[in-house]
Amino acid sequence: MPTHLSEDIATVFARDPAARSRAEVLLCYPGVKALYWHRIAHRLYLHRHTLLARWISARTRRKTGIEIHPGAQIGRRVFIDHGAGVVIGETAEVGDDVTLYQGVTLGGTGKDHGKRHPTVESGVIIGAGAKVLGPITLGRNVKVGAGAIVLKSVPEGCTVVGNPGRIVRRKDGSRPTLDHANLPDPMLERMQALYHRLTDLEKVLRDCACRLGCDQCAEDSAHCPLKKQDHSNENPAS
């Protein structure tokens, strides 16, 4: 069995607890099949047999639902989980130990020639439905949340979520895990921060209104500092 195929099978066992046997992985995992045929098509593409390479790529897409252009450079121990809807463009570069979930696109943003697809360095995890577009670079061990749209390069070890993609966690030296569902929610964090600021502002305004003798202070007299002071003067400590 070819070395790359053996590594691909071992990678499935390492990252997918649903895998039961080598035969099951070979027969039922579209990502393994797509990578196997891509390596053949890529070899033909490099030797200028572009028509045959594209035919193999198109046939593999019909069989697996995964479209990898024969010109794309794919590293070792890459894991494409489920695989439906994955698209990898011609000038894309994918490093070693990368994990791609269903619906991931490594695409371009226009009709420019030359390098127009992303470079994904080793150890990157890209969640389901994420789109990485243009000639950008995802540094080593980057995590991209499900549904994110990444249009700018991301430094090593960061986590990106949202549309457009925002960096919500910086490098901490640890290796990313497959738990890409439990990522920070930057919008929720900002809303919570805004809520706390509004709460503090309301308290300040309420205190100022009480000091100015505003009638509406009666609605919340328990918090009015002047009423507290008046009450303490009426009942001095013995």
Image (spheres, rainbow, N blue to C red):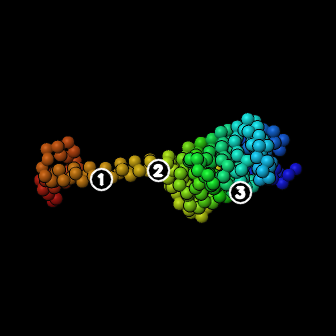
Question: Which dot, 3 or 1, sits closer to the camera?
Answer: 3
- Indicate the secondary structure of the residue bearing disc 2: helix
Q: Amino acid at mark 1?
A: Asp
Whether residue 118 is visible, yes or no, is no
Which tag, 3 or 1, sits closer to the chain's start? Answer: 3
Measuring from the top left, give residue 112's x and y in whole percent.
58, 50
| Quarter-of-image position of residue 135 | bottom right
Give the labeled residue for mark 1: 200
25 left or right, relative to 152: right
Which tag, 2 or 3, sits closer to the chain's start? Answer: 3
Q: Amino acid at mark 2?
A: Pro
Question: For the residue carrying disc 2, how many other residues have a C-alpha within 10 Å: few (<14), some (14-19), or many (20+)?
Answer: some
Question: For the residue carrying disc 1, how many other residues have a C-alpha within 10 Å: few (<14), some (14-19), or many (20+)?
Answer: few
Question: Which dot, 1 or 2, sits closer to the camera?
Answer: 2
46 left or right, relative to 118: right
Give the labeled residue for mark 2: 186
Give the labeled residue for mark 3: 96
Q: Residue at x 53, y 55 (%)?
A: 152
